Amino acid sequence: MRNKKDGGTLTLDDVTGWWETDIVDIAPGSIRIRGYAIEELIGNISFPAMIWLVLRGELPSKQQADLFGAVLVSAVDHGPQAPSIAVARMAATCGLGLNGAMASGVNTLGDVHGGTGQQCMELLQDVDARHVAGLEEDDAAAEAIAAYRERCGAFVPGYGHRFHPVDPRAVRLSELVRESRETGTVSGRYLVAGEAVQRVLSRGKSKPLPMNIDGITAVVLLELGFPAELGRGIFILSRSVGICAHAFEQSRQGERIKGPTPPGCGFRYRGPAPRALPESIRKSPP
């Protein structure tokens, strides 16, 4: 083999260094995750703690793992009305295997469906930075919202819900954040930022605009020290469980090629009225 860089022969260092990672080290009979032997991790730490270890490099405390696990539980499923779930179920009726149906559902989790948690994390980081710089909480929130809208448009992620007047997941996670603040597990600074955004967005409304699952998840993940870039990935980890369950359930129901709406619903056509092909381009009578 030749080294493309210098034309020389590939050395053992060249081969073993093709991929570099701080996450895992393997050898015959040995698997170490972030330095810990896998057989010591198995049976001794929870799955949320394992996810934390892989993503962050260190083990969480029991309290941190419990709060992180609550986030993972909260976003598992939201029914077939959620595009990620519906697409996975439709894919299963088209003959895709479980992996293909799951991938189809996961691939719908973009900037609008699935990515708003990350966007809200970035917004709350901006609110917190402005507050730390000296602005009052609500002033910091107002400025951060204005800056966000200038960059991204009028919609502000993390608040209000198209289906739930009050998102029950957000209510429970908010309770857990407050409890964790009391025990010192989190500082509460991003809960303060999130509530300031809520107050600003609620100005002039008859009822407060409540935080939704994306907003409170953003608060919790920031409180736990996760970077915003991981917000979407963590949501996908959680929702993948629901996607898997729905795709599997659908595959056992025996339906074929099930579309997004019942056949009787049809759709609205908005194109040209019926028209004939011009005589000048016809090759034979219709």
Image: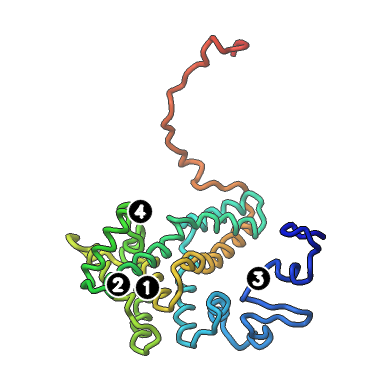
Which residue is at a point 58% across and 12% down the rendered structure image?
282
Give the residue type that dot 2 points to.
Answer: Ala
Q: Tell me where residue 119 appears, x and y as whole percent.
A: 40, 62
**Quadrant of the snapshot with the C terminus:** top right
Mark number for residue 152?
4
The amino acid pointed to by label 4 is Cys
Q: Earlier in the sequence, mark 2 or mark 3?
A: 3
- Disc 1 crowd rating (10 Å Cα; few below 14, some 14-19, many 20+) is many
Residue 181 falls in image quadrant: bottom left
Q: Amino acid at mark 1?
A: Val
In contact (CB < 8 Å): disc 4 and disc 3: no
Residue at 25% over, 68% down: 140
Q: CA distance from mark 4 to mark 3?
A: 36 Å
Circles 2 and 1: CB distance less than 8 Å?
Answer: yes
Mark number, residue 193: 2
Q: What residue would you read off at disc 3?
A: 20
Percent coordinates x, y for residue 30 in the rendering:
74, 82
Secondary element under disc 4, as helix, strand or loop, is helix
Give whichever of discs 1 and 3 has the lower sequence position: 3
- Location of the N terminus by quadrant is bottom right
Secondary structure of the residue carrying numbered label 2: helix
Secondary structure type for disc 1 = helix
Within-10-Å neighbours for mark 2: few <14, some 14–19, many 20+: many
Q: Which residue is mark 1?
A: 219
Mark closest to the chain's N terminus, 1 or 4: 4
Q: Earlier in the sequence, mark 4 or mark 2?
A: 4
Q: Which mark is residue 13?
A: none
